């Protein structure tokens, strides 16, 4: 079986040769067609001369190096320039002269180092060629005007410089595109890291907080074996749920995993509330309606809002009354979580802010509204309006 990666690497390495070798051969053959004789560049005004062995060598130097223009652009330019010089000095004026601007475009586009040095050396080589052609043109027309005026040499040089400029523009465009792709890749990686951090925060913090609260309560229940056993059982169940949710998160991070498992099944909110109650937090839960089939990621975000609010209530207002109200409709999901804030630990259950900031980002992505504020009489209120049928 052919290794696909090797085939692609070979194509990238020799792809330009595969295309430009036939082009060079076609240009080489076309230069010898009688109808195209002396139809190429005529610099210096020398009279056309019939082809000889040296013409074959000059045309070959102009055409065949195009096959290596991508791998060795400077070598290609040097050989093509040599062939072009012989072509013009001998007066062949072959069609192969069009290879010179192609070589210049290649060097300007592909050369990574010593571009200015290469351009300077090419310009320095052009000067003696222009002088020689001007002198030969004057010799061919004694007593009359030279075959080529200095302005003609300058114009031709500017045309070559334009070809070089095209190559430079192609190179800068390619570099800008590579930089854009690099930035997009970095932004994508950063967004993915942020998403993973939010998922880990939501999954781990809630379960671990519940386990810590239950374990602290167990320290005071040694005299009541039945309640101690119930508390330790709750700790064990919470740990198992944490492991299950972590495995679910790892499945989501698997690139081969489908997107359908992102939305928690209906009933997870009830499980979440029951777990919080087992940790010693009195929770009143009301759910109106059922998630719509087109809710997409809205139900997942609603689940995370309730989870974060209950986690903060456990951490900062343990024992305080907490009410959770979730309303489902075809167009949106509304979540309201209120905590009295008069529990054993006191303080507003706002958390460190990282979880709430992550929730705000989740809700904003779906085009909803999110708020988390202190209440005038004490406590904390979390509100979220999440449009259904958002991003899936």
Image (cartoon, helix red, strand yellow):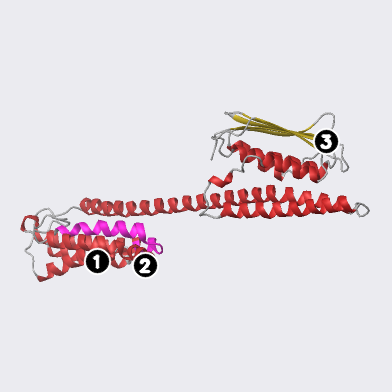
Verify whether residue 100 appears in magenta.
yes
Counting residues from the start of the chain, the first of labels 1 and 2 encountered is: 2
Q: Name the foreground residue: 145 vs 302.
A: 302
> Where is mark 1, residue-wise?
65
Labels 1 and 3 touching (C-beta < 8 A): no
Which of disc 2 and disc 3 is earlier in sequence? 2
Mark 3 surroundings within 10 Å by alpha-carbon count, few (fewer than 14), some (14 through 19), many (20 or more): some
Instruction: Kindly indicate whether the residue at mark 2 contacts the one at mark 1 (C-beta within 8 angstroms).
Output: no
Prevalent SS, magenta region = helix
Task: Return the residue at label 3.
Answer: 321
Q: Secondary structure at mark 2?
A: loop
Estimate the x, y position of residue 57 in percent, counting from the top left.
15, 69
Kindly identify which residue carries mark 2.
3
The answer to which image quadrant residue 339 occupies is top right
Helix, strand or loop at disc 3?
loop
Residue beneath the point at 13% across and 65% down: 90
Q: Quadrant of residue 365?
A: top right
Real-space Cα separation, disc 1 to disc 3, in angstroms: 83 Å
Q: Point out the residue furthest to the front here.
A: 226
Image point (25%, 52%), residue name: 154
Where 158 falls versus 19 (above or below)? above
Left or right, residue 367 beside residue 85: right
Q: Is 110 included in the stretch rendered in magenta?
A: yes
Magenta stretch bounds: 95-118
Instruction: Please give the count of numbered marks on the rendered protein.
Output: 3
| Circle 2 crowding by C-alpha within 10 Å: few under 14, some 14–19, many from 20 | few
Is 381 placed left or right of 59 in the picture? Answer: right
Which of the two discs, 3 and 2, sits closer to the camera?
3
> What is the CA distance from the residue labelled 1 to the residue labelled 2?
30 Å
Q: What x and y, as percent, mark residue 50? A: 6, 63
Q: Mark 1 or mark 3: which is in front?
A: 3
Query: Could one spot residue 121 in this view of the protein?
Result: yes
């Amino acid at each position: 079986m052919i290794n696909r990666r090797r085939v692609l690497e070979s194509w990238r390495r020799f792809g330009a040769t595969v295309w430009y070798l036939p082009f060079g051969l076609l240009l080489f053959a076309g230069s010898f067609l009688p109808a195209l004789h002396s139809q190429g560049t005529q610099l210096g005004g020398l009279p056309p001369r019939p082809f000889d062995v040296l013409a074959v060598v000059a045309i070959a130097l102009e055409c065949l190096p195009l096959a290596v223009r991508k791998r060795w652009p400077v070598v290609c330019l040097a050989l093509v320039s040599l062939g072009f010089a012989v072509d013009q000095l001998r007066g062949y004026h072959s069609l192969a002269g069009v290879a010179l601007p192609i070589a210049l475009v290649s060097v300007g586009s592909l050369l990574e180092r010593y571009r200015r040095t290469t351009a300077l050396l090419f310009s320095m080589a052009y000067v003696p060629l222009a002088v020689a052609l001007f002198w030969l043109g004057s010799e061919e027309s004694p007593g009359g005007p030279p075959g080529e005026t200095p302005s003609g040499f300058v114009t031709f040089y500017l045309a070559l410089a334009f070809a070089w400029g095209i190559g430079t523009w192609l190179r800068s465009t390619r570099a800008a595109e590579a930089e854009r792709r690099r930035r997009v890749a970095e932004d994508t990686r950063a967004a993915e890291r942020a998403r993973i951090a939010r998922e880990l925060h939501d999954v781990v913090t809630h379960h671990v907080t519940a386990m810590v609260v239950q374990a602290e309560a167990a320290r005071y229940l040694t005299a009541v074996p039945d309640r101690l056993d119930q508390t330790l059982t709750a700790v064990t169940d919470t740990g198992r749920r944490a492991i299950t949710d972590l495995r679910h998160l790892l499945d989501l991070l698997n690139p081969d995993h489908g997107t359908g498992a992102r939305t928690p099944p209906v009933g997870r909110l009830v499980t979440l509330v029951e777990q919080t109650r087992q940790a010693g937090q009195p929770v009143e839960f009301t759910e109106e309606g059922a998630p719509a089939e087109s809710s997409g990621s809205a139900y997942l975000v609603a689940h995370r809002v309730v989870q974060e609010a209950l986690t903060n209530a456990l951490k900062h207002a343990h024992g305080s009354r907490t009410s959770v109200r979730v309303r489902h409709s075809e167009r949106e999901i509304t979540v309201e979580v209120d905590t009295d804030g008069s529990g054993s630990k006191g303080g507003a259950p706002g958390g460190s802010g990282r979880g709430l900031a992550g929730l705000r980002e989740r809700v904003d992505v779906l085009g909803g509204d999110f708020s988390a504020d202190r209440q005038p009489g004490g406590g904390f209120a979390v509100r979220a309006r999440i449009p259904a049928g958002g991003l899936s």
